[in-house]
Image (tube, helix red, strand yellow):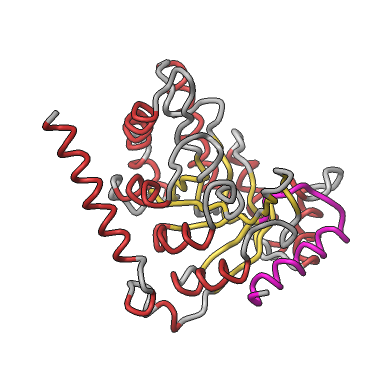
Amino acid sequence: MKEKRMERRGFLKYTAAVTVGTSVLGTSIFAAAKQTPAKLRKAVQLGMLPKGLPDADKFKLAKKCGFEGIEAYPMNDLDAAREQGRLARAAGVPIHSIVFGGWRTPFSDPDPKVIKKGLAGMETALRCARAMGAETVLLVPAVVKENISYADAYRRSQKHIRKLLPLAEEVRVIIAIENVWNKFLLSPLEFARYVDEFDSPWLQAYFDVGNIIIYGYAQDWLRTLSKRIVKIHLKDFRRRGYQWTNLRDGDVNWPEVRLALDEIGYNGFMTTELSGGDEAYLRDLVKRIDLIIAGK
């Protein structure tokens, strides 16, 4: 009981510290950042580009439509990964991140075989990211299920992810934890604590604007996670009808999101994670992102 009281006391102390840092913005840790507008770069996931085109043409189309970067996926062949990265850079849209995911081999699973497969997959993804020239690998850290408690998911995932940090440092690629509908890290305070407990620059947050709309507000999460955020996904969601929408057609408060980005001084890529489409669709998507960047 004493140990549990200490854990609770520690969490409340941490919560208070994070809350102080994100309250009354005029005197918050963001005061200096407010003076420097965020430098936002538009990116698109590789899977959103027309399927029938070779990679080189996909990258050229992305550049033509106004994107500045690509988010790709792991490849087992590192030579092929290097070539894909080269083609993207040549087109002017470097691969800035790759998505490993983790739904099939979550680090919360009690089965050692699942963990072994997940670790091997992430090791490949980290090396692939290095070969492509990417800065981050997106990871879903854990999945809470009927037979996997929240506490076990928290403990197990941290234990196994720590095994990957030496490799992340070696290849100079950040493991970016994303908030998804996995019944885990359900508040910005907890997400911040989870990241901080690794105490490593090679473990940061990948924030998805649309994923939290059913149980929170994106601007609140941005201000709380703050400098922990290394990458951002752009999606939108409509609570009424419970459906994904195109950007600016849902319930995300984009003007507040834009203000929060300036307040935390975020500088980096914002990657669309939507359904794919043709050139006209992609051009329209870029216009929507430009309106978001303009604070509209």
Residue placed furthest toward the left: 2
Query: How far across and down, in percent of the image, does residue 180 sit?
Result: 54, 41
Residue at the location (37% across, 37% down)?
A: 164
Residue 234 lies, with reference to residue 99, above or below; the image says: below
Report whether 283 appears left or right of 212.
right
Report whether 271 appears left or right of 66.
left
Which quadrant of the figure has residue 284? Answer: bottom right
Residue 237 lies, with reference to residue 224, above or below; the image says: above
Q: Is residue 273 magenta?
A: yes
Query: How far across and down, in percent of the image, does residue 177 sit?
Result: 46, 45
Report whether 281 appears left or right of 208.
right
**Which secondary structure class fits the magenta region best?**
helix
Specify start and end residues of the magenta stretch as a single range: 272-295
Which quadrant of the figure has residue 8? Answer: top left
Q: Is residue 115 magenta?
A: no
Query: How far across and down, in percent of the image, does residue 122 sit?
Result: 48, 35
Name the quarter where the C terminus is drawn: bottom right
Residue at the location (32% across, 48% down)?
A: 193
Residue 237 lies, with reference to residue 186, above or below; the image says: below
Report whether 208 appears left or right of 165.
right
Residue placed furthest toward the front: 240
Residue at the location (33% across, 37% down)?
A: 162
Name the quarter where the N terminus is drawn: top left
